[in-house]
Amino acid sequence: MPKGEIVLGCLAPHPPHVVYAENPDQNEPVSEGGWETLRWGYNRLARKLKTIDYDALVIFTPHWQTYIGTHFLGLPEFKSKSVDPVFPNIFRYNYDIKVDVELSEIMREKASEHGIITKMMRNQDFRVDYGTITSCHMLNPDWDKPIVTISSNRNAHYYSAEVMNEQAAALGRACAEAIEESGKKVVLISSHSLSHRHFVTESPLPEDMSREHIYNHSQYVWDMKLVDLMREGKMRELIDILPEFTEQTIAETEAGGLTWMMSAMGFPQYSAEIYGYQSVIGTGNLVAAWDPNAVTREIVL
Amino acid sequence: MEDADILFGIYCPPHPQPLLSPEASDGYAKLRQAYDTCRERIENSDADLIIVYSTTWPSIIGHQIQAHPEPEWVHVDDDFHYLGSMPYKFKMDVDFAECLRDSAKERGLHSRTIAYEGFPIDTGSVVALKLLNPDNRIPACIVSSNMYANRAETIVLGKSIRDALAKQGKKAIAVVVSSLSNRMFTEHIDPTEDRIHSPKDDEWNRKILEFFADGRLEDLSQLSREIHGQIRVQKVVAYKPAWWMAATMGQHNNYQGEVLAYEALHGSGGAVVTLTPSSGSFGDKEFDEDDVEYYHGDRDVLDKGML
């Protein structure tokens, strides 16, 4: 069996607003659009994904928060409704998800071998988190590939952002080994915003774009610093400053997703493909991808 | 502020073990027994309403209030999914929820009611309502804990609840769902070997329980920032339950307190405590922060400081 490989890594933020704005059949609320810069970037990345041969999407999500180890989805199908606990007015999504349990189990096993506390999630009533659903819907609205969801162990809460970085990097190495061993072609997804300070009020029409802007300039400057490093292919340096970025911008990188993905991909030294940046209810959101194949790698923006 | 009728208050933990696996350890069984005692007291009261403030329901857009008349779902905890599912069907006091929303707005808070089929009611609220009010004999109201809110906003939220109770002339039981120390073990453990994560957490928990037992709720409220720094994992900006409980029940120390159980829940401090208004307690602390009647939002001090 040939070795498995990571064929693409995606930074895929999950504000439910982007699904709301797309008006898919699965989502109950209806919108007049909004957040086009982000959605059009997502749409273009989704088109690129259609041209890539892969077996599964593996997603690390901040909205399945676990404090006792890292958990993996461990049943082949989940079908239910996801209602966002924070924005229920815009996200009530009926989902039907297939899971690559074989890959999930190999990842759990490898993570455990690396000393990481792990658990398979095998409760059929479990509701898949809206981060997973939003990012996966935007990248693959046809839902024609199985996924693996990995929970985010909250090391940043219990210890520090530095410990989070170390543990997420170890999990990334373990997942890379698991993918190699599985013989599968896998797309990694790190599902989160960059800066993550929200406005605490909402306009009467959530998609009123005249009200949308970054929470403050400091958040924007930090976000752009990260984008610059991504363009320059300095992912090791980016991960090194991530604890400070996370603290300064209360960033969603605290969950460990970006560190996990970069570690699994060997800290790329090539430019990221930048698809779009936009604020959503004050938070900074970037759609980006890392393509290990130099032939298909693009300068998008 | 309007005069409100709070019959008594309950402080209880959010973890699912007392509901799903009380037999797994003596400690979990004692917590379950304490919940059962509270349930009986609620049944023997003439309360019109149970108000739940749950630290495991974080909100961002202001303060959310559950207003679906009969929310129904099967809930599964993110960490403790292997303990089983929690099917629920609750009865909410929609009139009160709407009155509270309006009262909160009158005091300057951003608030809204939530009434959507399938809305994910949090583990803490599910555990509390299933154990304290299993037959839905009394309607409930659940309010969220805004993750950015600090003292002023939380105090004003409590006062809004008093306003709404007074407007509707309802007698209520106030339930806070929160751990004391909230650091859990980061590995899976044998429940029979459960203990408080560290001696420091245990000592602080016991100090807090002394205050509860003495009925010194307002003193605890004034210690909230210290408690947050000492024994709370820094997930949110502040330890808010004592602020909410004091502002909702009355900002004083005149309570009869009773600690029904104190046990470890995967390392965190789980206590079931009741506080009943009385005239027999006292405190030894004095406010060094302003009391707050209305919330005015951000003060924009950064803009004012610009040259």
Image (spheres, rainbow, N blue to C red):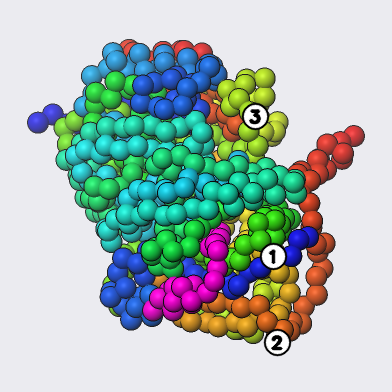
Q: CA distance from mark 2 to mark 3?
A: 48 Å
Residue B169 appears left or right of A146: right
Q: Residues within 10 Å of mark 1 (few under 14, many from 20)?
A: many
Magenta highlight on residue B44 = yes
Residue A136 left/right relative to B45:
left
| Image quadrant assignment for residue A5 | top left
Chain part drawn in magenta: B33-54
Amino acid type, mark 2: Gly
The residue that mark 1 highlights is B4
Q: Earlier in the sequence, mark 2 or mark 1?
A: 1
Which residue is tagged 3? A203
Task: Kindly identify the amino acid type of the residue bearing the numbered disc 3.
Answer: Ser
Decide: is B240 above or below A220.
below
Q: Chain of mark 2?
A: B
Q: Position of residue A97 (x, y in %)?
A: 26, 33
Element at badge 3?
A: loop
Q: Could you tell me which secondary element the residue under label 1 belongs to? A: loop
